[in-house]
Amino acid sequence: MTTTTTKQYLNYINGEWITSSSKETYEVTNPANVEEVIGEFPLSTESDVEKAVNDAHNAFQEWRKVPASERASYIYRFIELLDENRERLGEALCKEQGKPLKEAISEATRGVNEMRFVAGEAVRLDGQTLPSDRRGVLAMSTRVPIGVVAAVTPWNFPVLTPLRKIVPALVAGCTAVLKPATDTPLTSVILMELFEKAGLPQGTVNMVIGKGRKVGDTLVSNPLVKGVSFTGSTQVGRSIYETASKNFTKVQLELGGKNPGVVAEYSDLKDAANQIVGAAYTNAGQRCTSISRVVVLDKHADELEKHIVENVKEFKVGNGLDSETTIGPVVSENALNELLEYMDIAKQEGAQILLGGRRLTGGIYDKGYYFEPTVINNVTQDMRIAKEEIFGPVLIILRVSSFEEAVEVCNNTEYGLTASIFTDKMEWGYAFMEDVESGMIHVNNGTNSEGHMPFGGVKNSGVGPYSIGGTNKDFYTDLKVSYIQHNK
Ligand code: NAP
Ligand code: MG
């Protein structure tokens, strides 16, 4: 008989791996097979958070003075290590979160590519000089790092999201404390190992693992934290915004979405279906930028629906480590139950489940959280399933009679993250760009964003400077305006 001991993981604070002061831990299991325990992780306390923030604050006093190009060279070293560890990260990600291995490795690859752009931002932290009103005066603005940044991240992109917050913080001269999602802490542990290996000075990067309500909330309310970069649900985002406002702490909130994909006068409906399905079901639909509502002109609807269903039937749901798998399990039992609830709501509201809609059972399916890729039609815009974010492999189809009605349907939601249109009429493409309330617009393509472009949402999808692209520096730095009388 073999006995296996569960591996214990620790917090990373001030360059040391330490247990939580509570000594309490929790287990993370693989959503593809809950019998597989990934590891035991600390359930951290308020005092762990306080220590991490104090240490990050102390480290900031030195780090902010390190020349920008030198800060970048630490990051270049880190990126080399990230590149070497893509497969290891991908495997850990697949096991703790469920996405297919190939998708998981590409998430890490994406991280490498994006961080190269971010590292270069160090030497593009620009200010302005303007002619002074006075003789002998130089009037200028410079950027200064804000201080300690809290990074609070979700489980759906557990490699990319921490990178997108910690690396720009370091590059700008800030220090960081990461609180990863409870469901997916292992990839964050690996990232910390790589920061340590890259030789980042102690205290510049820290990680405290534990529950959002305790660790997350304590972090956000700490007055030494000068910025909170959060990605997650609109509900938690709202509570973070409230808490942060008490100390006038800056926020960068990236929240939920109910992203439409419009099809109107587009000759290649098969292509539209292909692109919509790709954008809807990647990562089992657990992306804030997933297309989740198809809005289609009546006259195309039957044919488009047929192509969508054919396409969705091709998916192979399974363990992400199996090379055949194209859709993994959803992340947790809660996530699965929420999906099942939405299926009941859909039926009660009179919608029709065209495909899927159930938990998968039998064989390996009984050991994980597997949900059938689902397509729902007969949906009207007043239904809950048309308005609320359903975070999973579920696509709903709304029929409209005109382009104007399509725009109205797109805007009839609290969210405004991304929106796509497939059309051969470029005047509609432009009108869509102008009239749809959304942070990001895609004409004739799905919802893929690029790693050097700003990323963010409007309405209840986000607030604060957009992340990822050059706009990040507006979050991680404050402006300092100086007048220097150099001559009388
Ligand atoms: P979530 O429940 O909002 O959690 C996100 C993070 O916040 C987790 O680390 C969570 O910790 C923590 N948290 C929970 N309560 C908190 C509190 N009171 N104070 C501070 N932190 C707290 O979101 P999720 O379920 O992980 O992720 C799914 C959501 O994220 C979806 O709505 C999706 O649309 C959104 N999302 C948005 C984007 C975007 O860029 N706009 C990208 C990805 C995902 P625990 O894990 O311990 O709960
Ligand atoms: Mg949650």
Image (cartoon, helix red, strand yellow):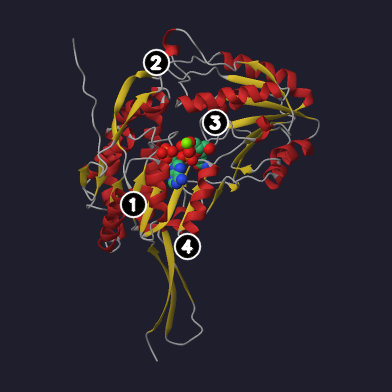
> In the rendered structure, which amino acid carries the disc numbered 4?
Phe
Q: Residues within 10 Å of mark 2 (few under 14, many from 20)?
A: few
Q: Quadrant of residue 354?
A: top right
Q: Are marks 2 and 4 in contact (CB under 8 Å)?
A: no
Give the number of the disc on residue 391.
3
Percent x, y for residue 33?
Answer: 38, 17
Disc with the residue nearer the chain's start (2 vs 4): 4
Disc with the residue nearer the chain's start (3 vs 2): 2
Q: Residues within 10 Å of mark 4 (few under 14, many from 20)?
A: few
Is residue 309 found left or right of 206 in the rendered image? Answer: right
> In the rendered structure, which amino acid carries the disc numbered 3?
Phe
Which circle, 4 or 1, is nearer the viewer?
4
Which circle, 3 or 2, is nearer the viewer?
3
Specify whether tag 4 is near ligand 1 (CB below 8 Å): no
Disc with the residue nearer the chain's start (4 vs 3): 4
**Quadrant for the C terminus in the image:** bottom left
Residue at 37 percent across and 46 percent down: it is 215
| Residue annotated with mark 4 | 248
Give the number of the disc on residue 323.
2
Specify whether tag 2 is near ligand 1 (CB below 8 Å): no
| Residue annotated with mark 1 | 176
> In the rendered structure, which amino acid carries the disc numbered 1?
Ala
Instruction: Note whether 59 is above or below 366 in the view shown.
Output: below
